Amino acid sequence: MKRGYLSDYFDGIAAKRLSAVEADMTRSHQHELNGVERLKQLFGPASERRMYSARFLYLTDDEHAPLVADGTLTWYDARERHPTRSEHRLYFPANPVMDKARAGDLLVIARRPAGTVLLVVAEQGSTVANQVQWLFGTENLTDARYVVRDDLNAERHRIAAAKRAILEQIGIEVEPPPDAHLNDMLRRFGGAFPNTRVFSEYARGTVRDVDCCDDPDATLLAYMEREEQLFRTLERHLVGVRLEQGFVRDVDGFVAFSLAVHNRRKSRAGYALENHLESLLSGQGIRFARTTTTENRSKPDFLFPGASEYQDAHFSSGRLTVLAVKTSCKDRWRQVLAEADRVLQKHLLTLEPAITTAQTDEMQTRNLRLVIPRPIHTTYSSDQQQWLMSVSEFIELVKIRQRG
């Protein structure tokens, strides 16, 4: 069995757009989804009633965490006694997630290997809905009919960093593959996490067959993928050791430990992206300042060519460049607009796939341009791709400006 694919976590999925009857409980009080033939591909014929433990999620761009409800799903044939006809249905008790669902929202029903079901509803027109569709390969939903995917070990379903982030949004913890570097990390770092710069440098040192000058986009993704794998490997070991020690009657200690693990995950990814980009820029001989201060005590992540040039009123503003770095955008991209007043057009490097056209259109009107590694461009529409900038294109732009 191949490892590192969606098939590790799902036996199959069915996706569709919710119809008005399915989403509006004032029009249908049955709390059921019709079990059409395509849904039978997922659950099989209901020769008898089958009940599944289920987790329901509602996702929207407006909330940092999904709305979650636990419950059950019942798969049955409403005409099981009929000699020639069958009418399959999927019943769910009322719950806050389905109460919030609206017509046009994305629905994904996913069977898990443990015999449970994950039911995800994502708000229509949201970035997170785009991302869930991209995750499962259902981008081309055109009507209210189900699209079923049961080939989740195909190459397009291999789990890389962008897919891992989306899986975590829907509550799936991706296990790191076995890694031969664990013993070396424990020896080097003394059984603890080093600072982010040291860890990023170590991760880069384990990557082979990449060339930061030949393909900066692939190199940056390779560095991030490797650091994520090494981080999760070391984290899994260190957390396991701490859990074995136990938290006997120490509730506050357990809560503090859990928060520390969560916060380290969130902050480390951003620092890792900055660290690896810094290494790429230095390897290309580009001059820059990292987190230097501009007006109103703003601190852009990267300022080109540097702080002294920015402060020099005689230095042409057309040769200045500012780049913010965020692993994901959401509404945080607007923070970038207030950084470095002398630079009219801002740039933002992110690894986030499938941002909506409405969001990228607003970015364009606000003079912000996205820089995204080339392999992630395919998650965007063809029109959006014309506007996106790759890492290599951004590097070339800065080189031209620095040559004057």
Image (cartoon, rainbow, N blue to C red):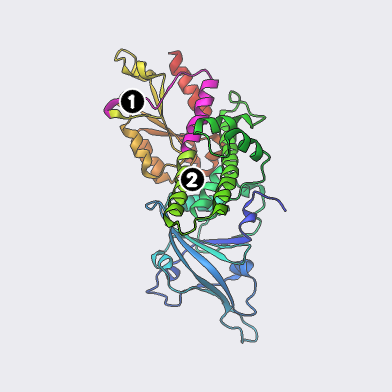
**Taking 82 as reference, is 310 left or right?**
left
Query: Could you say which is closer to the camera, residue 159 or residue 289?
Result: 289
Q: Which residue is mark 1?
A: 293
Q: Which residues are magenta?
A: 270-296
User: Where does the image place residue 142, in percent across and percent down from the top left?
Assistant: 51, 57
Give 404 or 252, whichever is nearer the viewer.
252
x%, y% of residue 5?
64, 50
Q: Which mark is residue 331?
A: none
Q: Earlier in the sequence, mark 1 or mark 2?
A: 1
Vertical placement of residue 152 versus 271, above or below: below
Along the viewing direction, whichever of 351 and 290 lies nearer the viewer: 290
Q: What is the three-letter code of the residue carrying label 1?
A: Thr
Neighbourhood count class around disc 2 (C-alpha, 10 Å): few under 14, some 14–19, many 20 upward: many
Q: Which mark is residue 354?
A: 2
Q: Nearer the viewer, mark 1 or mark 2?
A: 1
Is 161 drawn above or below residue 52 in the view shown?
A: above
Give the answer, above or below, for where 13 lies relative to 89.
above
- Mark 2 residue element: loop
